Amino acid sequence: MGLTSINNSISNIKNILTSATIWALCFTVLLGSILARTITGPIKEVTSKAAKLATGDFEHIIPVRSDDEVGKLTEMFNYLTVRLKTTLNEMNNEKSKMETILTYMTDGVVAVSSEGTIIHANPAAFELFKLAKIDVEGKNFDDVANMLSLPFDVKALFQDEAEKSNLISNGDSTIRYSIVPFKNQGAETAGAIIVLQDVTEQENLDRMRKEFVANVSHELRTPLTTIKSYTETLLDGASEDRDMTLRFLNVIDSESDRMTRLVKDLLMLSKLDYDKTQLNMKEIDLTKILSDCVYKMDISAKQKNQSISLEINDEIPQTIGDKDRIEQVMINIISNSIKYTQEKGKIHVSMWKEAEYIYIKVRDNGIGIPKKDMARLFERFYRVDKARSRGLGGTGLGLSIAKQIVEAHNGQIQLDSVYGEGTWVTVILPIVSSVN
């Protein structure tokens, strides 16, 4: 038999198998593409959102379209986004809080890394050392320490774990520093924090307190010693001599008056310090008060052959104040001018009005005050010439009391002097129309 029919059948079978294979491959590719898209689509979306997340965009949430592994991955990614956003917000809040604290705290703070580089310094630290931010941050600590003449280098920051504290001088300022190392997560020393505190005022107050105690002790000891020695002399039999007894009693009386004045001035200062002095504020005539003060002090001036003059340039309006306290201030100032002006010297008192203020100036051509003593004249018990001041009967508290009385009237007191030529004191009082 011929093989033509068989060959045709085989050829048809081949065509059928080929077509079936092609169709099967096309279907498989189509099905595979669909399946792949359902799997890779969410993964690509997660990848895209992850890229945005890396740039700081936390606002997009990926929709979950299935419950399979890809859906669970999407859910976890969304949870990660929310948690990361919350954590970063908390960190930013804490960072902002710390930056605000460091910026506005009065103590200086300097952070130094373990490599010796200054990684942070707050504005107070720049202010303490009069430096700019560019001069400090990122610089080597040893270089900055040498520039500022600090008594320690970067090695001293990490010598031991205990906090170190001491005082350093920076020009006219006194700074207390404390050094505290800090650690990283591995409990290794990562750097050190230097806290700087300006204690200039505290040191000055402590010095003034010590001087005050020493001066009070000295001022009281001198008259007490005199009184005791004269009393013992009288008890030992000198009282039989009437003239000597009277002379000794006069000295004792004088020294007692001196102590009384001192204690009275101290009580006055104490009351002024604690605002316990009740000022008798009422309408006063400064022209009359000043005229009366000059008249009262004219006798003391004439005893030293001094001339004292009064000049009132304007019509001075009446103001509100404590008459007795203002008079006390003016008598104290004029009295000082008389004490520290040589015989036949001149003292000139003037008063005038400028804007809403009344100016009272007392000027003399006395011994004057050295420039180095000018800043401390209003300190308690401070004297330029201690021996001469005590000899003239002063307590060293007059100017301090005058300053506080004037300031209690919302005024100012200014003192200028040229050594060897004279001194002028100016009291500035505001014009007040009614009692507050």
Image (cartoon, rainbow, N blue to C red):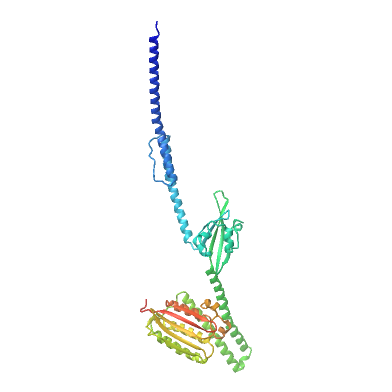
Residue 162 vs 333, above or below: the answer is above
Q: Nearer the viewer, residue 288 or 4?
A: 4
Residue located at (56% from left, 90% from top): 250
Location of residue 370 by image quarter: bottom right
Q: Nearer the viewer, residue 103 or 51?
A: 51
Q: Quadrant of the C terminus?
A: bottom left
- Left or right of 51? Residue 190 is right
Q: Give percent across and percent down for residue 36.
A: 41, 32
Q: Give percent across and percent down for residue 206.
A: 55, 71
* Residue closest to the far right: 236
* Residue closest to the far left: 434
Residue located at (47% from left, 57% from top): 99
Q: How many marks?
A: 0
- Left or right of 187? Residue 315 is left
Do we see residue 107 in this rendering? no
Residue 358 vs 177, above or below: the answer is below
Do we see residue 132 in this rendering? yes
Q: Give percent across and percent down for residue 368.
A: 53, 83
Residue 112 vs 200, above or below: the answer is above
Location of residue 218 by image quarter: bottom right
Q: Quadrant of the N terminus?
A: top left
